[in-house]
Amino acid sequence: MSQITLVALILFAITYVLMLAFQKIRPHIVVTSAVVFVALGVIASVNPNLFGEGFFATATGTYSYGIADMLNAIDWNVIMMIAGTMGTVYLFIESKMPQLMSDVLISKMPNMQWAIVTISLFAGIVSAFVDNVATVLMIAPVALAFCKKVNTSPVPAIICIAVSSNLQGAATLVGDTTSILLGKAANLDFSSFFVDNGKPGMFWVVEAGAVVSALIILVMFRKEKGKISFDSRTVVEDKFPTFLLLGTIVALIAVSFIPYADNAKPGQFTKPDITNGIICIAFFAVGLLRELFIKKNKEIVKNAFKEIDYYTIVLLTGLFVVIGGIEAAGVVQVIGDAIASLGSGNTFVVFTIIVWMSVLLSAFIDNIPYTATMLAVVPAIGAGIGLEGEGLKLLYYGLLCGATLGGNLTPIGASANITGIGILRKEGYEVKATTFMKYGVPFTLAAVTTGYLLIWFIWK
């Protein structure tokens, strides 16, 4: 291992440790790390012998990482998709349409057991198209309401909503940040999550996991037979945000049939790399312009910008730069070779390691930086076991399955879980880790095992 590769690996490890230790300032940490990687690149180009001759030599050449490389490392399509979708989702939540949909579903349930199963599945369906945290925020109040009506603790219901939301985030391209990251890395569009080269896509894998985990919930709540009654339903006066969200989804589906330049045949019409991001931003902009000039509601426009998760956006932006730096330094290749060697070149063993390693790690660390890092490593792992092109889909999907669903093992493994516990805390319920894991562990094992087996048999 060369000197610059070792330094970059140590810097990357320190960055991760600090992000784990100081979660509130993770964006600051990762941006600082990004600056260091770029500074090393500038030094390498200006004075390559500053730290001694051969310091910047890598296995494939010389470390080169300047401002232009940094800007190219940032995936602007992903950043725009996240910002635009978050904004549109805020308008959707403000319209109260999600609450009405929940009310209609729950009002048709015979008892508490089926109400919890149904609202968990409903949360999952919504989460396939809406951010996981936003899903929990919009559906948890409904669960609180019907739990109060039957005089039972809302803790189990809110936990089930949170884990279901986290599960279904992997079902579509816009369901979760990890899905958006995978879409770019594996050249997947919206339709690819449903049918990918004639094979069932990730959507069906996730839905199979959802069905199995719903059966687990059904068994766990078999004693909850209390009746539920709703006196009134939420009134929705503005349906335009619903059409905006649907329009975003339809537009993403439509452009998914147009290839990117990297995947196009000679002479075929292609789309810009930032197409999906432009679509998400455009629909959000339409909603803002309507609120501003037609409804004259400046307050909701201000709040819409406030509700965009700048924390995640800055974190991801810095992380893209850091990952670009470790790639330039040869660290990604080193990690890929190490994982490939652990599997002794056996595809099934390597696939298994990726899935279950991702489950365990995502139970304790944020799955966004982990997924972003591993997506860069997967091609190197594939090269070590003779997989490339379409063959890498097996590892990509395995990574998404483990990283997304593994967060449900613990209360700190996913933002949706933390949000759900925060809601319960405001209601006076303190949730212990053991209480959460009572529901999270069987749910996760059922969903991950189902996904793990299906992905292998579909994509092996």
Image: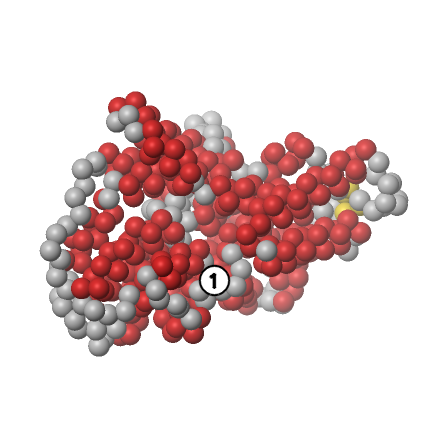
How far across and how far down the image is residue 104, in percent? 16, 53
111 in relation to 243, above or below: below
Q: Residue at x 63, y 67 (%)?
A: 342
Tag 1 secondary structure: loop
Tell me residue 288's x, y (percent). Answer: 34, 29
Look at mark 1 in the image and give the residue it sits on.
412
Q: Answer with the quarter of the image where residue 208 lies.
A: bottom left
For residue 93, which quarter of the picture? top left
Nearer to the camera, 233 or 92:
233
Would residue 99 be seen by someone viewing this image from the given angle? Answer: yes
Task: Classify 71 as above or below 23.
Answer: above
Q: Is residue 417 left or right of residue 110?
A: right
Q: Observer-nearest residue: 318 or 178?
A: 318
| Disc 1 residue type (three-letter) | Ile
The residue depicted at 79 percent of the width and 52 percent of the height is 2
Color encoding of the figure = secondary structure
Within-10-Å neighbours for mark 1: few <14, some 14–19, many 20+? some
Q: Is residue 446 above or below residue 417?
A: below
| Quadrant of residue 301 within the rendered picture | top left
Q: Indicate the quadrant containing the N terminus: top left, top right, bottom left or bottom right.
A: bottom right
Provide residue 369's location: percent of width, then percent of height.
Answer: 55, 52
Q: Residue at x 36, y 43 (%)?
A: 191
Residue 254 % position (x, y): 33, 35
Name the residue furthest top: 293
Is residue 323 visible from the viewing direction of this image?
A: no
**Horizontal side, residue 409 vs residue 208: left or right:** right
* Image label count: 1
Residue at 20% of width from left, 49% of height from top?
101
Q: Nearer the viewer, residue 39 or 254?
A: 39
